[in-house]
Image (cartoon, rainbow, N blue to C red):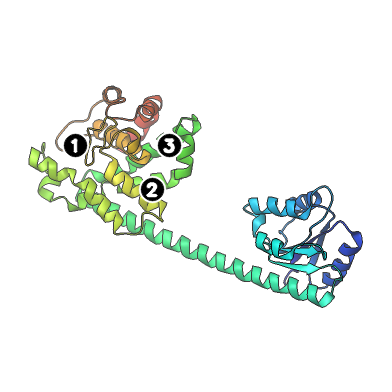
Amino acid sequence: MPEKKPTVLVVDDKEEIVMILEEILKKDYNIITAYNGKQALDKLRKAEPLPMIMLLDVMMPCMDGRQLFEILRMDKTYKRIPVVFITAENDTENELLAAGAVDFINKTPLKPEIVKLRVNNQIKLKKYSDSLEEMVEEKTAEATKTLENALQGLANVIEHRDLESGEHVKRTQLFVKTLVDHLIESESIYAEELKKLQPDIIMKSMALHDVGKIAIPDRILLKPGKLDPDEYEIMKTHTTRGKEIIGELGDVNTSLYLRHCEDICIGHHERWDGQGYPNKLMGDDIPLTARLASLADVYDALVCARVYKAAFSYEKAIEIILEGHGTQFDPVVADAVIEIQERFKEISQEYQ
């Protein structure tokens, strides 16, 4: 099957210029035409596929070439279409190139061979650029998948070492997902921030909240009773050790996934009133992801039996969260847990 011709959008208010360009290019390209910027935008919205290149006149009625060019640069899809300006003698070509145009063609006179060469060269560059972007996207997706597998592997190690962690991880992930969804849907003060933090990545990151327990000795991690003060101090180091482990996996400044993991590891035992550990952070200084993780973790610890305690009732767990409202817990997040407590209860029962 022959390859489809690339599409070229020609925009000029002079019908004779449009006709000449169409005649020059129609053998090798599919031509779309427009006579001002507004018509060109309308054609772009309907175009399938998008043009590979745009030939754009500078001076036009309704919306001139510069105005259209600025609109295109602000759009994440259209800004990838290379623009070659069709210029008259009085147009400042250096200015147009400096603004981001890839090339220009003089319309006085239009030379067919020059037009063909410049259009062909820019389309070749566009295809090459697109192939590079696709390759980068593939490699990025591959690297992300590898990272996810590595992090899930770490979570599985914890599950095998700490007999309570397997279903605990599933439950806390679902608690956090439910919390995030509710805070966004209810248009809470955290809604926009949570959207930017990417809810699906927050949920995935929750699996590693206790990864630092890898470094905790079995005599403490698996002790069938309450920890003494010295043992408790060692147990508390799972937060800092977790941060160290995540930091060894990659650059947290370039990976949102790793940054969430690090924030949750180091911060899920901090308290809203500054009396938590390891850094005694207070209020908004605690990363939002860690504040979500804190409530999910505490709720699960309350309603599930442990080797050192019996399970509390769901009602008692909510009472304890109310007691910690504004002291142990972020009040906005605590309110959200109270509002969706029935869903939390369902998750606990489903993944006992």
Whether residue 222 appears in this view of the structure is no
Q: In which quarter of the view is residue 100 placed?
A: bottom right
Kindly give the residue lying farthest to the bottom in the view shown. Answer: 113
**Mark sitting earlier along the chain (2/1):** 2
Disc 1 from disc 3: Cα separation: 27 Å
Q: Which residue is mark 1?
A: 306
| Type of the residue with mark 3 | Val
How far across and down, in percent of the image, does residue 134 sit? 56, 65
Q: Residues within 10 Å of mark 2 (few under 14, many from 20)?
A: some
The residue depicted at 42 percent of the width and 59 percent of the height is 145
> What is the quadrant of the C terminus in the image?
top left
Q: Say left or right for 336 vs 267.
A: right
Disc 2 from disc 1: Cα separation: 24 Å
Q: Which residue is mark 2?
A: 204
> What is the quadrant of the N terminus in the image?
bottom right
Nearest the eye: 319 or 314: 319
Q: Residues within 10 Å of mark 1 (few under 14, many from 20)?
A: some
Give the tally of numbered discs: 3
SS at mark 3? helix
| Type of the residue with mark 1 | Arg
| Type of the residue with mark 2 | Lys
Q: Are marks 1 and 3 in contact (CB under 8 Å)?
A: no
How far across and down, in percent of the image, does residue 290 sit? 33, 40
Depicted 176 relative to depicted 26: above or below: above
How far across and down, in percent of the image, does residue 314 sit? 29, 26
Kindly give the residue lying farthest to the right in the view shown. Answer: 16
Depicted 329 relative to depicted 36: above or below: above
Q: Which residue is mark 3?
A: 180
SS at mark 2? helix
